[in-house]
Image (spheres, rainbow, N blue to C red):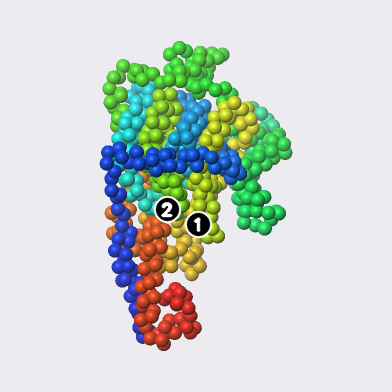
Amino acid sequence: MSKDNSIDDATLAMDTTQNDKLMEDAGKVHMDEGESWGTGIIKDIKRTVGTHWWTEMTNLNQKTVAVTLLMFISVMAPTLSFGAVYGKETDNRIGAIETILATTWVGVMYSLIGGMPMCIIGSTGPVLAFTKAVVRIAENIDVPFVTFQAWISCWLLFYCCTAAFFDLTRVVRLATRFTDEIFAFLIVSIFVFDAVGDPFSDVGILRYFDPNHPSHEDYAEDENYNYMEVALLSTILGFGTTALIFVFRNFKSTPFFCNDGVRSSIYDFAVTLSVLIMTAINEFLFNDVDTEQLNVPNTFEPSFQCCDSSCTTFFPDECPEQSEAYGSRDWFVDFSDLNGKGWVPIVAAGPAILAFLLVFLDSGITWHLVNHPNNNLQHGEAYNYDLCLVGMFNFVNGCFGLPWLVATTVPCIIHLNSLAEKDSDGRIVSVQETRLTMFFSHMMVGLSLLVLEVLQLLPMPVLYGVFLFMGLSALPAMQFWNRILLWFQQPSKYPDFVFTRYMDKKKIHMYTIMQLFFFGLVFFVQNYSTISIVFPLMTLLCIPARLYLAPRFFEGWELCLLDGDDTEIDEWVKRKRSSMRSLFFSGTESEREDLSENGPMDEDNAIEEA
């Protein structure tokens, strides 16, 4: 264009000074109007369970069966892994059996009466980190952990029901994509680190190369045992499982096989097939290599085995001279076992506030992600009702010495995407909203207690491979991750996102750095044991950071493009194009031809060129 071209000057002015005037409220976040006392819970029930329950319980088809198997593996693997870690952190007061039992009954019950059955209930890393802090507090005040947890659970139920009754869940709607993706990225990082090699623990595929890894200790006196051999095979099995899953899932978009039905079946059963193939390779081709197997207890009973009738010491670690355990702890927690400290039930209200914030944010942000307008869910949301249910479920778990459970981000995203139909651009067109996948998958988790010996055949590296797939498969849909990748790409070759089309590249990177800073804070606090109990507060801090800090550095229209939902973004782009169309046709014929550079072009191309 020529330097004195009036259209060029006007276009530049539009880009720098007029964008913020296209939509007056662009980038602003507003809190929804609150419901009157208790009304929100009733409306949630009518809108979801009361309207769509029968449809969601009767839509059985091949996809339902395939997704059920996928979710069984996706739920069972972290359930057992978290159970093992719970055993280490709680001195076996909570272990694999307790985690399986809690996951089974809560999952089945939620699938029957929950308001948002697309969400999967289970164990999460943040809740585990908080439980560690509760264990330390219980030790410091010299009361049994399970008793202290039970009293916290009582207060947790009270806080959850109170928040739902006064419709405080609308605060979660203030959590925009900024907060949602920080939290989702945190959960994804936990899955990836746990699969590849966690720098803060001894789990992960690459950890097998450590000669002092716990899995090598049982073979310390075996001269034929080679830990490097085990580590190499574990690496092949783990990363091979992940690669095989992606290969199978890619068949759906290829011309291989005779019809779409076969390709869809391979896609639907990709995880199941990959686990079976890699387990068979380990079992039949390398049966002389002692890879770590899934650690599953042999019998169904509480994990804590007692040395004597007081049941305060653990067999066999604290009484190695005994040949067998005196018995196991009672299933029901004794609320009066306070070591003479009658003030403990009152003091428990303090940690319960932090537990509530964690449950509120962990579940709420996951619900918010799943119910995002982009996902095209049609059966409604039930924040208040489901918060009451989560409080009730965890109260019961506390009474029986079971772990707290919340909505799990990555399994929820996998569940949603597996039941979705997408267009060629990857946008969700429709979702089969069903309760059956969660019901059957969690029933299978419970029935696994009857076949514990079969589960013991599963190699841990294969399950780590499933973990890695769960983490990696959630990344492409995250704008935060896509913006991080821009740092390693040629600017002229950036993908065609709406923010790369209209925004200055420096502002895009500045926003990513800001988001990465808050992610780093949350990640550090969660993994630093001394202050990990305040992790829920750090997550909550992301909301005011977006509401009050981000507008100081970014224009409203920039926040709209980076942080708005698709409806708001589409409206801004529509007004932008309309404004540029007016600008284009207000010029002379020669100016319009000059704008098109190579002569007249169609209207849309000319506007895009501007």
The residue identified by callout 1 is 427
Under mark 2, the amino acid is Pro
Above or below, 138 against 117 in this view is above
Can you identify the residue that label 2 sits on?
Answer: 373
What residue is at 61 percent from the left and 31 percent from the top? 455
Q: CA distance from mark 2 to mark 1?
A: 11 Å
Question: At numbered mark 1, what does the secondary structure look like: helix, strand or loop?
Answer: loop
Disc 1 crowd, CA 10 A, few/some/many (<14, 14-19, 20+): some
What is the x, y in percent for residue 552? 28, 59
Q: From where the camera sits, is residue 286 visible?
A: no
Q: Nearer the viewer, residue 371 or 472?
A: 371
Q: Looking at the image, which residue sits at the far top? A: 309
Amino acid, disc 1:
Arg
Residue found at the far bottom of this picture: 590
Between discs 2 and 1, the one toward the N terminus: 2
Question: If the image is split into quadrants, where does the C terminus sit?
Answer: bottom left
Identify the element where label 2 is drawn.
helix
Classify residue 142 by image quadrant. top left
Whether residue 312 appears in this view of the structure is yes
